[in-house]
Image: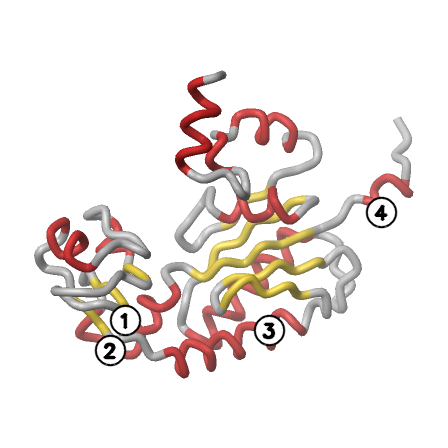
Amino acid sequence: MSLDRSAIVSVRKIIHVDMDAFYASVEQRDNPQLRGKPIAVGGSAARGVVAAASYEARAFGVHSAMPSVTAKRKCPDLIFVPPRFDVYRQVSHQIREIFAEYTPLIEPLSLDEAYLDVTENLKGMEVATEIALEIRAKIKAATGLNASAGISYNKFLAKMASDLNKPNGQAVITPKNGPGFVEALPVKKFHGVGPATAERMQRHG
C-alpha cells in the first residue's frame, strides 16, 4: 500500500520537555548533602507552601502547593530549602539554548517545561523520538539534571505523554493510538476541568 506523502508531512511533531522535580533537583545537584534525601523547596516546617518536592519527598505523598505543615506531617524528615529563583532562571536559560539548536518554535510554559515543534527542525532529523533523546542527553551533560519528554502530534497529547515514563524517560503517542488514549483519560486530566467539576461529571456519567 502506498503512503500519502502529503498526509505524512501534515502530521505535526511536537515534543513536550519537562524537567524532573526541577527546583528540588537543582538544590540536590548543588548541595551533595541533600542528595537522596526528601526535600521541599519553599515554605518552612511552620508556614508557607511547598513550591517543589524531590522524588524522595514525593514517595511520602508530598507535592507542590501542599501546605508546609501538611508536608512535614506526611514526611517528618522533610528538609525545607529556600528557593533560589535566580539560579533556576540561569539553568532554564541553558536548557532553552539547547532547544534553540533544534527549532525556533519553542513555547515555554514555565522555567522547567516547554513545547517544541520539531516538524521541520534545524537539524533535518525526521524522527522526533531521536530528537527528544538527543535533547535530554544534552540537558544532562550541560546541567547535570534529568528531563522527561512526551512526543505526539499535538500539544495536549505531548504533555500527557511526558508524564508516562517519569522520571528520566520519554513516551510517544502516535496518531494511531491517540484517540484511544484520550478516550481512556480521566476527566480531571483535561485542561480547565477542576476536581469539583470532574467529580460532578463522573457522577453523571
Q: Position of residue 170 (x, y in %)?
A: 51, 49
Q: CA distance from mark 1 to mark 4?
A: 42 Å
Corner quadrant of residue 46: bottom left
In the image, taking residue 144 as reference, residue 170 lies left or right, namely right
- Identify the residue position indicated by label 3 in the image: 98
Callout 1: SS: helix
Query: As shown in the figure, which amino acid type bears the numbered disc 4?
Result: Val
In the image, taking residue 193 as reference, residue 31 lies left or right, namely left
- Identify the residue position indicated by label 2 in the image: 31
Q: Residues within 10 Å of mark 4 (few under 14, many from 20)?
A: few
Query: As shown in the figure, which amino acid type bears the numbered disc 3?
Result: Ile
Q: Position of residue 120 (x, y in %)?
A: 79, 60
Which circle marks residue 28 in the picture?
1
Q: Position of residue 172 (x, y in %)?
A: 59, 43
Which circle marks residue 9 in the picture?
4
User: Which residue appears at 71% of the width and 67% of the height?
Assistant: 103
Contact check, label 4 and label 3, Cβ < 8 Å: no
User: Which residue appears at 29% of the width and 79% of the height?
Assistant: 30
Query: As shown in the figure, which amino acid type bears the numbered disc 2?
Result: Asn
Q: Residues within 10 Å of mark 3 (few under 14, many from 20)?
A: some
Q: CA distance from mark 2 to mark 4?
A: 46 Å
Contact check, label 1 and label 2, Cβ < 8 Å: yes
